[in-house]
Structures are given as C-alpha cells and as structure tokens.
Amino acid sequence: MSQPDQEAIGALPRDGLPVELSIELSPEAKDAVERVGDLSRERFAPRADEYDRSASFPEADFDDLFDAGLLAPTAPRESGGLGLGPLCGDAFGLWMMTKEIAKADLSLARCWEGHANSLVLIDALGSPEQQQRWFGGVVQDGEKWVAWSGEPRAPKPGEANSFGTAVTRVDGGWAVSGNKVFATSATGADWAILLVNRAGPGGARHADDAGEGLLMLACRLADSTVSVDDSWWDPIGMRATVSHLVRFDDTFVADADVIGEPGSYLREGWQTAFIPHYGASFLGAAQAAYEYALEYVIHQGKGGDPYVQQRVGAMLINVEAGHLWLDYVASLWDGGHREEAQLCGSRARHVIEHLAEETLHHCIRACGARALVRPSPIERILRDLTFYLRHDNDDHILATIGRAALGETHDPSFYKP
C-alpha cells in the first residue's frame, strides 16, 4: 500500500497551524512550538499507549521537556524560562505548545497544564525570593509542579470515602490534614500548590466564605507526612494523569512557602487564566483526530466518497475555528483587556469542547470501527476526551455565559450560580 500523499496531509506545517490561517507566532513561541511538536511526534506519541495501559506518570516525557529546555514555559525569560503565557504577553504561544502535546497524549497535556499554570501563579503572586528559588528548581533541576484543589463535598452513590482538608495555624506556618482527590501528577510532581481553606473543607470550588480564607500553600511532596492512595484512581480515560487520592497527616508548610495573600486566587480570578488552556488541550485532541482521519482515508482510497469529503471538510473547519477562538482570547490577555478575556475564555472553552467532540465523531464515522481498536490513538482519544471534558460542567459554563450577557451576578472562575 502506498504512503499517503504528504502534500495532501501537509495542511499543517511544523508550527502546527493550518496553512489556511494567517495567525502568526512570535519567533520565541514558534521555536518552542516546533521543538515541542517534534518531541510529541517522535517520542511522546509512541509512549502514550503504554502510559495509558499502565496508568503511570509520563516521566520520560517530562525528562525530554527538561533536556530540551522547555520545562519552564511560563517563567519569565530573566528567570530562565520561555516567557510565554497570559502573564508574559504571549498566551497563544503557550496554548499552541499545549495543543501539540495534547495531539500526542491528553494525559500528558493535563500534567503539563498543571505544571505551567502553577508557574504562572508563582510569577503572579510569589515573592522575589520564592520566584528565584522555585524557578531555579525547575530550570536547573527539572522540578515539576502542580496545583490541587479537589475536595468534593458530596459522595457519589456507593462511595465510602469522604474528602477534604483542614488547615491549622501553627508556629512558623500551617499544618494540613485530610485528603484531596483528582490530584493530577500525584506520583510525578515534586511540588504541589495546595488550595486549602481556613473555613473548612472544600478547596477553592466550594469556598463558603467568598474565598477570603483560601490559602495557597506550596508543599514539597517528598515530605514523609504526604502519602498517595492509588486505589481511588481507576477511570475510563486520562489514566496517565495519575490523579490519585493524596493524604496529608499534619503536613507542615512554612510561612516562606505560602503564595500570595489569603483569598487572592479567587479575588483576582486566576482560574480564568487557565480555562482557555483546557481548550487548547481539547483542540489538540481534535487536530489529532483530523490528521488521523486524513491519513486513514487517503490510505484507504476513500477520498472520492462525497460523505467522507463532507466529514473531512467539517473537521478542518472545526480545527481552524478552534485556533481562531484561542488566538482571539490570547489577544485580549496580551492586550491587557483582562476582564473581557476572563469571560471570553469561557466562551472559547465551551465552543472548543463541542468542536472537539464533533471532530472526533466525524473521524470515527469516516474511518470506521478499526479506528477504535487498540492501539489506535483514536480509541484512547475517545476515552480521554470524554473524561477530560467533564473537568467542568458545560451546562454551568453556558449558564454563566448567559448570566454575564444578561447582567446577572456570575462566577467566571468556577461557574457557581
């Protein structure tokens, strides 16, 4: 069987953008996106199936990112980072890096998001001493970060566990007891930013005091009082995020490791800087499905089928639309239009969720059942995307967008009524 026509498949050059789009990346971002794209194709994608089957942290992928000088994307350049992201004036560059990673492995992209977003918080709210210490650990030693909030307040049917943390003021810092779930990168990260509330369990999403008691505590995960229960995490998809249950037994966090002022995370709306970042991962899954379908139907000689042509055309339009939405939101962040960017990010995330689902559907329809037989990447993308899209409730997102349009009170961070 002949190889597919690379001219036909090559609608996506090395920077990962459809040639029909005229979106420009900064020189720094273009270089980073091309390099992470090469790693994603040559190393991350071939490993993704094994990480998924074993539900293990993609350690070798992070080692490659570190060796390539790509592990500090959102740290400022003067600190040894790439200077990308919504705080550095190049949000689109960061999101295109994430999209390239997500094309190879959505689980890896989620771990990467948590790491990159944590560095944004350190840059935004950390003291100069903290920034020097922690950025240095990433750039020089390859330390990996993540941020954890997950403390569901109600159990699901048949669930015996209760979740939540309590934080107590002690001499020189804070003591944390209890547990968190959905703790992404639990067995891979070196540091976790714990979002805990002095008012009681609930983390950030369930803050009962308007979030003014919400603390961000940087916890070194090698601490002997921190333990991981890997029996809780057995999901249908996103398995390699190793988002286990993590327990804290009077874990001490010194005042020197407290990030920002109490309540600053919610008061300043930092979650809104990360919402479109999820959309970049969804877009990566959509583009991976489109590229797979394009190669598949050319290999199979199905390009002359008008129904296949329609599905390929719809996939291309969806991928283009996702890029345009992210570019628009990035322009708002980069231009300093923060309030508008916060709400527009949710609109982009909502739209891209549906574009990604539809694109995957078109891919499966065009390629048939064999696309869902392991080790096909489409089988894994279907499971991963289905699970990851539940990260936020799209019904609540859309209602929040509507409340904002109507001038009603709304929560742009966690979509609470």
Image (tube, rainbow, N blue to C red):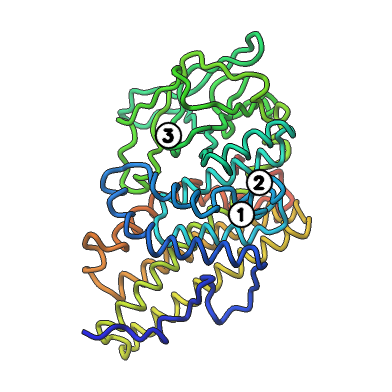
Q: Quadrant of residue 4?
A: bottom left
Alpha carbon separation for disc pair 3 and 1: 27 Å
Query: Residue at 41% across / 37% down in the picture?
Result: 243
The correct choice, above or below, for 72 with respect to 289 in the image is above
Query: Residue 411, how many percent across, how many down?
Result: 66, 42
Amino acid type of disc 3? Ala
Left or right: where 85 falls relative to 45 = right
Q: Is 416 drawn above or below residue 384 in the view shown?
A: above
* 3 or 2: mark nearer the eye: 3
Q: Helix, strand or loop at disc 1?
A: helix
Residue placed furthest toward the bottom: 304
Q: Which quarter of the picture shows residue 246?
A: top left
| Residue type, label 2 | Pro
The residue tagged 1 is 346
Q: Earlier in the sequence, mark 1 or mark 2?
A: 1
Relative side of 348 to 226, left or right = right
Q: Which of the two residues, 19 or 325, is positioned nearer the viewer here?
A: 19
Asked if the residues shown at circle 3 and circle 2 are in contact, with their CB atoms under 8 angstroms apart, the answer is no
Residue type highlighted by circle 1: Ser
Please give the residue where the numbered disc 3 appears in the rendered image: 186
Residue receiving disc 2: 412
Query: Please, is residue 366 above or below residue 282 in the view?
Result: below
- Mark 3 → mark 2, Cα distance in angstroms: 27 Å
For label 3, the crowd category at 10 Å Cα-Cα, with few meaning under 14, some 14 to 19 and many 20 or more, is many
Image quarter hosting the C terminus? top right
Q: Quadrant of the N terminus?
A: bottom left
* Residues at circles 1 and 2 in contact by the CB criterion of under 8 Å: yes
Q: Which mark is residue 111?
A: none
Foreground pick, 315 / 184: 184
